[in-house]
Amino acid sequence: MTTFDFKASSPINCDQLEFELRNHPDRNFVSLLCNSVRYGFDMLVSDINISTYECKNALSAGKIQIQVSPIGIAVHKYSFKKRLILDLSSPHNSCDHDSVNDLIDKDLCSLSYIKVDDAINAIQDYGVNSICCKVDVCDAFKQLDDFLTVDRPTDCGERTMALLSLIFNKLSIPLSKKKTVGPSCVLEYLGIVLDTVNMQARLPQDKVKRITDFITLILSKKSCTRKELEQLLGHLNFATRVILPGRSFQQSTLFIAKGRSKETNIMKLMRKLIMCAATYNFAVCSEHLPRKSNVIADALSRLQMNKFRLLAPLAEATATLCPQLSDILWTAQ
């Protein structure tokens, strides 16, 4: 009989982590954290009584055969560094099978990233010539790898950097030497240059060039693909982190990129609404309802009619016809 070692793979020295947290007042939190690092984190999947569904790996994974969610290789578009990914959102657009992400309770498992605005607020609190230190964890996920400290101008930045290095080394958490910076009054954090001497937050020159080159490329074309438009929006959206007036100019373009539907008639309505918003400079906003709060509409959108009938027993037996396009638009052209 085959036995399995269910310990999670992590470089973190969990025994040392537990020792360092020995005086933490919330013992339940400490126990949960350390056990999760050792054995893996509970994703709090809401329903495990589901049928098995077989998904193929992404083409980038080659011929690897393994019984997990589909895997693939993601390549960073600028550094070309390759990273293994596990697609927990698969199967996509399936009416009969839920993905792992679909089953996770979003209210219990939400995640908020630290924003560059948080760093800017700390610098504003400590004033001109604040001292910053940054460390970067090797191969961590997205913004979870960046750690920033901000000290007063009169504090010892060298001591802060020494403490940071000591803590990460004791926990065996590997740091990127190339991205570990400080103490300094000017450094790049989350892709933005923070300058406490001039009290500025600005784009790095390489990003300025990348954005302007891409804008020049788009302007040289008579038309662009949807993917190119979304890529341009991504660049501009990033720039508005520090170029605040640019946010008001993005609303109409952002709505153009996001407003989409597979239904031809709905797209006609969307185009009219988009052009109206762009012409008269207003924005149309939508609010996401979590799946658990919108179960009837969710079942209907997935064509799960039996489930829909159970949830809405008073619904009419026959569908109501949608009005003609000419009835809901001032013109059907």
Image: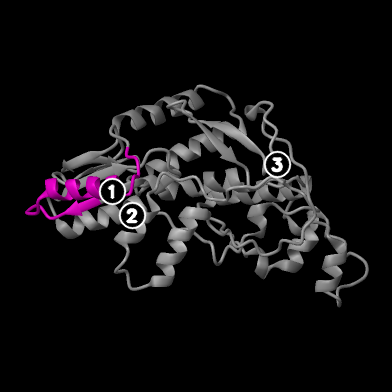
Amino acid of disc 1:
Lys
Q: Secondary structure at mark 2?
A: helix
Distance from the alpha carbon under mark 3 to that under mark 2: 33 Å
Q: Residue furthest bottom?
A: 314
Q: Quadrant of residue 85?
A: top right
Q: Which residues are magenta?
A: 149-175
- Badge 2: few (under 14), some or many (20 or more) residues near its Cα, within 10 Å? some
Query: Which is more N-terminal, label 2 or label 3?
Result: 2
Q: Nearer the viewer, residue 18 or 199?
A: 18
CB of mark 1 within 8 Å of CB of mark 2? Answer: yes
Q: Is residue 80 visible?
A: yes
Q: Nearer the viewer, residue 319 or 296?
A: 296
Q: Report which residue position mark 3 lands on.
A: 67
Q: Secondary structure at mark 1?
A: helix
Q: Residue furthest front?
A: 1
Amino acid of disc 2:
Gln
Q: Quadrant of residue 319?
A: bottom right
The percent position of residue 9, horizontal first and vertical second, equals: 49, 45
CB of mark 1 within 8 Å of CB of mark 3? Answer: no
Q: Report which residue position mark 1 lands on.
A: 170
Query: Which is more N-terminal, label 3 or label 1?
Result: 3
Q: Tell whether position 160 is magenta.
A: yes
Query: Which is more N-terminal, label 2 or label 1?
Result: 2
The percent position of residue 222, horizontal first and vertical second, equals: 58, 24
Name the disc covering residue 206, or none.
Answer: none
Q: Is residue 285 above or below residue 75?
A: below
Front tag of 1 and 3:
1
Image point 36% across, 52% down: which residue?
115
Amino acid of disc 3:
Gln
Distance from the alpha carbon under mark 1 to that under mark 2: 7 Å
Name the disc covering residue 16, or none.
Answer: 2
